[in-house]
């Protein structure tokens, strides 16, 4: 009796009949729903930097897990008249510094875990380059190559309508990502505007110029990759002229990067996309490559280079600079020992796994992390958002100058942090980002 009186009301209440369920299925850890392999990769990188900064457990808990993730069901009428149901997500990782910011992708592998990881990296990316945004990410699980233009439009509009309640020009601003672009952002902007009853240009970035887009947005991420690569390469005492560059991915990032590298005198010796990869030791004619892609859609059959036996064979070709600008988890413990580059610059999000990066580090290969290397897109997205809010536009020259200036400042800060703490560039970049984030959450306190 004494024991029963001593126990708390909660203990006496029990688990409401869930004992058997919990015994067989277990109780998930906080956030376990999104603990995918990509999320674990992002979290491991976060913890490395947090350890160097000696962040307290309470601050880590507030900075690591996403604030919210919305899952939506998207019924769409296909061209055949059939109704297909797709799944979409919108993850908002942190809103401590400002509204959420992050792309919307159409891809077969879109999942809650992927969106959670990418939203964490967006938070760090925005903090690193000192933008007043938090991180977000979203997408729809589908095969965009098998959708007609009409089906894409209906899918994007339905997605925009379903996430309407958690987005807004001062809440969360989407943008293009994998397999989405200006056209899709125009549909998104129109759908949101129809729902609120007036035009809202600042609801998305990466829009057509006629709807409030900005000069230079389409090229921003690829240009930023090359700008950062040049800073890193020059710090090693070399010039880009004549340097051999390999580019994996020929989308909005990789193709622009290949063009810009060639413009600066580098030799692009190999490229690859979903259809395969090709190599020309004398250098690929980028203008001819762009003409081929414009006409045929894919690299396959391009006459200006020799096809390689496997799509990812280009990752181990001899070169000075390697640009993985396609998908995550491309450089792993399975192939990192065979990489023959001196510098790896991450054009994609998460292309190097922690195990792969450790092997690269042991071999003296420097890695410029994604949260800096591909931040050009979100920087110019910020410029677009500001212009939409102010109803004022800047010239292409002003955009480029501001972008390059902001990247130069971020590179200088990361390089200094790397030397100060004796850490690699990824940890240094996350240190710089986490300093700002930790200061912001500590200043805001915990509500309620």
Image (cartoon, grey):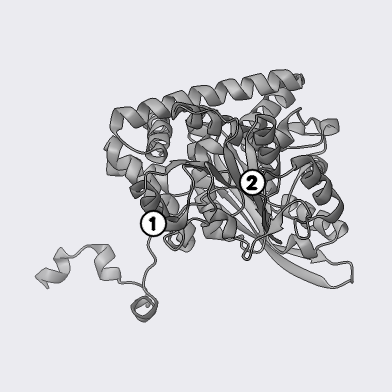
Residue 151 higher or lower than 22, as above or below:
above
Q: Nearer the viewer, residue 387 or 294?
A: 294
Residue 357 higher or lower than 51, as above or below:
below
Sequence-first tag of 2 and 1:
2
- Asked whether the beta carbons under mark 2 and mark 1 sit within 8 Å of each other, the answer is no
Residue labelled with disc 2: 269
Q: Residues within 10 Å of mark 2 (few under 14, many from 20)?
A: many
Residue 45 lies left or right of residue 270; in this view the side is left
Check the picture and name the quadrant holding the C terminus.
top left
Residue 405 higher or lower than 47, as above or below:
above
The residue lying at 36 percent from left, 75 percent from top is: 22
Q: Which mark is residue 355?
A: 1
Circle 2 or circle 1, nearest the eye? 2
Residue 72 lies left or right of residue 30; in this view the side is right
Q: Nearer the viewer, residue 232 or 397?
A: 232
Residue 351: x and y in percent read 52, 52
Cα separation between marks 2 and 1: 27 Å
Residue 343 lies left or right of residue 257; in this view the side is left
Residue 331 appearing in the image:
yes
Residue 98: x and y in percent read 54, 32
Residue 302: x and y in percent read 78, 55
Residue 94 appearing in the image:
no
Image-quadrant location for residue 215: top right
């Amino acid at each position: 009796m004494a024991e029963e009186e001593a126990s708390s009301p909660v203990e006496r209440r029990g688990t409401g009949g869930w004992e058997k369920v919990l015994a067989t299925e277990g109780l998930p850890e906080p956030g376990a729903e999104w603990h995918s392999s990509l999320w674990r990769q992002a979290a491991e990188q976060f913890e490395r930097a947090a350890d160097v900064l000696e962040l307290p457990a309470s601050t880590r808990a507030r900075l690591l897990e996403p604030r919210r993730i919305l899952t939506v069901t998207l019924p769409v009428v296909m061209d055949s008249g059939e109704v297909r149901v797709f799944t979409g997500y919108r993850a908002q990782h942190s809103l401590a510094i400002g509204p959420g910011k992050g792309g919307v992708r159409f891809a077969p592998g879109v999942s809650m875990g992927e969106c959670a990881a990418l939203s964490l990296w967006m938070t760090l990316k925005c903090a690193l380059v000192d933008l007043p945004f938090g991180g977000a990410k979203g997408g729809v699980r589908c095969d965009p190559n098998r959708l007609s233009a009409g089906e894409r439009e209906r899918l994007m509009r339905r997605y925009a309508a379903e996430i309407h309640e958690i987005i807004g020009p001062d809440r969360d601003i989407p943008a293009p990502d994998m397999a989405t672009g200006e056209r899709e952002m125009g549909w998104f902007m129109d759908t949101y505007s129809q729902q609120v009853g007036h035009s809202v240009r600042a609801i998305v970035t990466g829009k057509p110029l006629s709807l409030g887009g900005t000069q230079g947005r389409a090229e921003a991420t690829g240009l930023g990759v090359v700008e950062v690569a040049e800073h890193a390469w020059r710090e090693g005492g070399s010039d880009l002229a004549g340097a051999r560059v390999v580019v994996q991915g020929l989308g909005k990032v990789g193709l622009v990067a290949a063009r810009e590298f060639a413009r600066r005198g580098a030799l692009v010796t190999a490229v690859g996309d979903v259809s395969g990869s090709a190599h020309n030791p004398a250098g690929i004619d980028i203008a001819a490559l762009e003409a081929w892609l414009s006409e045929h859609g894919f690299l396959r059959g391009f006459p200006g280079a020799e096809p390689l036996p496997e799509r990812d064979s280009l990752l181990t070709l001899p070169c000075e600079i390697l640009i993985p600008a396609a998908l995550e988890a491309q450089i792993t413990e399975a192939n990192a020992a065979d990489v023959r580059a001196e510098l790896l610059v991450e054009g994609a999000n998460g292309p190097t796994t922690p195990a792969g990066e450790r092997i690269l580090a042991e071999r003296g290969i420097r890695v410029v992390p994604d949260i800096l290397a591909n931040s050009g897109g979100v920087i110019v997205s910020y410029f677009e958002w500001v212009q939409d809010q102010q109803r004022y536009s800047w010239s292409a020259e002003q955009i480029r100058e501001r972008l390059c200036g902001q990247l130069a400042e971020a590179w200088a800060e990361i390089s200094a942090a790397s030397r100060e703490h004796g850490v690699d560039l990824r940890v240094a970049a996350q240190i710089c980002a986490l300093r700002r984030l930790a200061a912001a959450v500590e200043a805001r306190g915990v509500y309620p």
